[in-house]
Image (cartoon, helix red, strand yellow):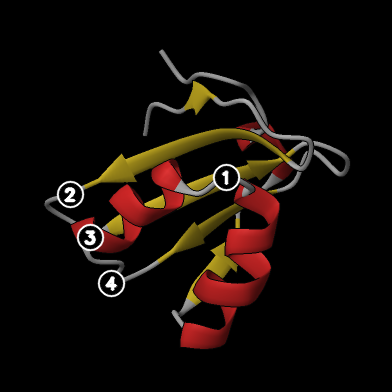
Amino acid sequence: MQRVPIESSSIASIGYAPQERVLELEFRQSGEVYEYFDVPAEEYTAFLAADSKGTYVNQQLKPRGYRYQRLPSSAKCVTDV
């Protein structure tokens, strides 16, 4: 999945696959990449519109209980081209 860099102190990049409904986040400090599954497009849009991406993740995304997985370290790059 291709990720794009975003303006955030905690999130380095984000990607979204609408057909699969998979949201991918790369965290800035740790460099870890997580995939969140069954995320509706509306959630992705709301995330992008949030003033604070890190706050959105902690107060909106995580409490919704989306299934997720951490990707292997080889997935840690700003864009997969």
* Alpha carbons under labels 2 and 4: distance apart: 9 Å
> Helix or strand or loop: what does disc 3 sit on?
helix
Return the residue nearer the eye: 10 or 68.
10
Q: Residues within 10 Å of mark 1 (few under 14, many from 20)?
A: few
Q: Please state which of residues 51 and 35 is positioned toward the viewer in this rendering.
A: 51
First in residue order: circle 1 vs circle 3? 3
Q: Are marks 1 and 2 in contact (CB under 8 Å)?
A: no
Mark 3 and mark 2 lie on one chain; the one further toward the N terminus is 2
Tell me how far mark 4 sits from mark 3, CA to CA.
11 Å
Q: Residue at x 45, y 28 (%)?
A: 3
Q: In the image, what residue type sits under mark 2? A: Pro
Q: Which residue is mark 1?
A: 51
Classify mark 2: helix, strand or loop: loop
User: Looking at the rendering, which quadrant does residue 73 occupy?
Assistant: top right
Question: In this rendering, does residue 65 appear at all?
Answer: no
Tag 1 secondary structure: loop
Residue 61: percent from the left, percent from the top? Answer: 51, 71
Distance between the Cα atoms at labels 4 and 1? 23 Å
Residue type for callout 3 = Glu
Give how far apart the Cα atoms at labels 3 and 2 are: 10 Å
Q: CA distance from mark 1 to mark 3?
A: 16 Å
| Callout in the foreground (1, 3) | 1
Disc 4, disc 3: CB below 8 Å? no
Tell me the mark number nearer the camera, choosing from 4 and 1.
1
Amino acid type shown at disc 1: Asp
Query: Which type of secondary structure does the marked residue at label 4 adopt?
Result: loop
Mark 3 lies on residue: 42
Nearer-the-camera pick, 60 or 29: 60
Horizontal arrangement in the rendering, residue 21 relative to residue 61 (left or right):
left
